[in-house]
Image (cartoon, rainbow, N blue to C red):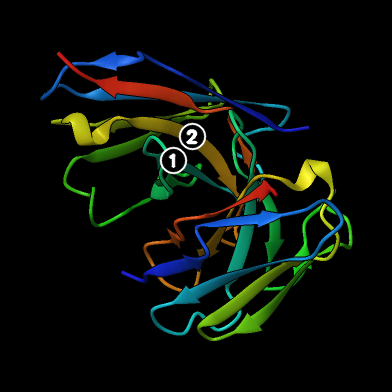
């Protein structure tokens, strides 16, 4: 099973600052990598797929990059609505697997 | 707008079978190249993909749960269902149904339902 490791577990950021979240795969997932945003009490919401393609409804301040085993989600200027938990997901191999999540909290 | 809604008991006794149903509205479960999926989230933890079903009935399960999982579909009711047998406390989680749009990513989710395994 492909293991996805996210870091840091918690990221404390002030509004307006940049946030950089990391996701590492135990083996190459090529570009089959997605990100989800989850707010308390809600289901996850697809944010990015194919490493860097934003899903409907998400602004350009969210960007994804990387390939093979190392991936990054960047939020260029954090807004209040961006404080949430972010999960990466690989879909290169079965079973589909998710990372443990990074909680982005207000500093 | 597609909507998914989970339903089923919130409390299941150890060794029994967990049964949940997902009702899809705003679109037919039989249309499109979609894979109807179950995902769970243990309290305060990450996400675990359980398996999917295509409207034709073909399924694929997570090997870690395969011996205990069954997913079925009822196209006449626009529903699909999850059964997980021989549950233990480790199966306590929020269970989500979701739509895989054929790209192995999930664009629509239900709100989730907490299932607690306890006597």
For the C terminus of chain B, the image quarter is top left
| Relative image position of residue A8 (x, y in whole percent) | 52, 64
Label 2: which residue?
Answer: B96
Displayed quadrant of residue A59: bottom right
Lower position in the chain sequence, tag 2 or tag 1 = 1
In the depicted structure, whether residue B14 falls above or below residue A86: above
Q: Is residue A58 visible?
A: yes
| Relative image position of residue B95 (x, y in whole percent) | 42, 32
Q: Secondary structure at mark 2?
A: strand
In the depicted structure, whether residue A48 falls above or below residue B71: below
- Of residues A21 and B77, which is closer to you in this image? A21
For the N terminus of chain B, the image quarter is top right
The residue at the point 83 percent across, 52 percent down is A58
Q: Name the side, left or right, on which B19 lies relative to B80.
A: left
Displayed quadrant of residue A81: top right
Q: Name the side, left or right, on which B44 lies relative to A36.
A: left
| Relative image position of residue A47 (x, y in whole percent) | 71, 55
Displayed quadrant of residue B53: top left
Label 1: which residue?
Answer: B38
- Of residues A75 and A106, which is closer to you in this image? A106
Q: How much space separates mark 2 and mark 1, taking CA atoms? A: 6 Å
In the depicted structure, whether residue B3 falls above or below residue A53: above
Q: Please count the marks in the image.
A: 2
Within 10 Å of disc 2 (Cα), the crowding (few <14, some 14-19, many 20+) is many
- Of residues B108 and B48, which is closer to you in this image? B48
The residue at the point 60 percent across, 77 percent down is A71
Within 10 Å of disc 1 (Cα), the crowding (few <14, some 14-19, many 20+) is many
Q: Is residue A50 visible?
A: no
Q: Name the side, left or right, on which A8 lies relative to B86.
A: right
The residue at the point 64 percent across, 82 percent down is A66
Q: Are marks 2 and 1 in contact (CB under 8 Å)?
A: yes
Q: Secondary structure at mark 1?
A: strand
């Amino acid at each position: 099973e492909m293991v996805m490791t996210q870091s840091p577990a918690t990221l404390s950021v002030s509004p307006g600052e940049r946030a950089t979240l990391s996701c590492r795969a135990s083996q190459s997932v090529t570009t089959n990598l997605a990100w989800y945003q989850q707010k308390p009490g809600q289901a996850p919401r697809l944010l990015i797929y194919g490493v860097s393609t934003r899903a409907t409804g998400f602004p350009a301040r969210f960007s994804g990059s990387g390939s093979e085993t190392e991936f990054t989600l960047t939020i260029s200027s954090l807004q209040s609505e961006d404080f949430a938990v972010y999960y990466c997901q690989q879909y290169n191999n079965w079973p589909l697997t998710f990372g443990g999540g990074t909680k982005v909290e207000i500093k | 707008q597609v909507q998914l809604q989970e339903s089923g008991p919130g409390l299941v006794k150890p060794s029994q079978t967990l049964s949940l149903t997902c009702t899809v509205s705003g679109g037919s479960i039989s249309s499109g190249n979609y894979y109807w999926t179950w995902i769970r989230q243990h309290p305060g933890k990450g996400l675990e993909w359980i398996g999917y079903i295509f409207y034709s009935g073909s399924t694929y399960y997570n090997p870690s749960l395969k011996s205990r999982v069954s997913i079925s579909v009822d196209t006449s009711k626009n529903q699909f269902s999850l059964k997980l047998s021989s549950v233990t406390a480790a199966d306590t989680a929020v269970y989500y149904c979701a739509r895989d749009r054929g790209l192995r990513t999930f664009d629509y989710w239900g709100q989730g339902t907490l299932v607690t395994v306890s006597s």
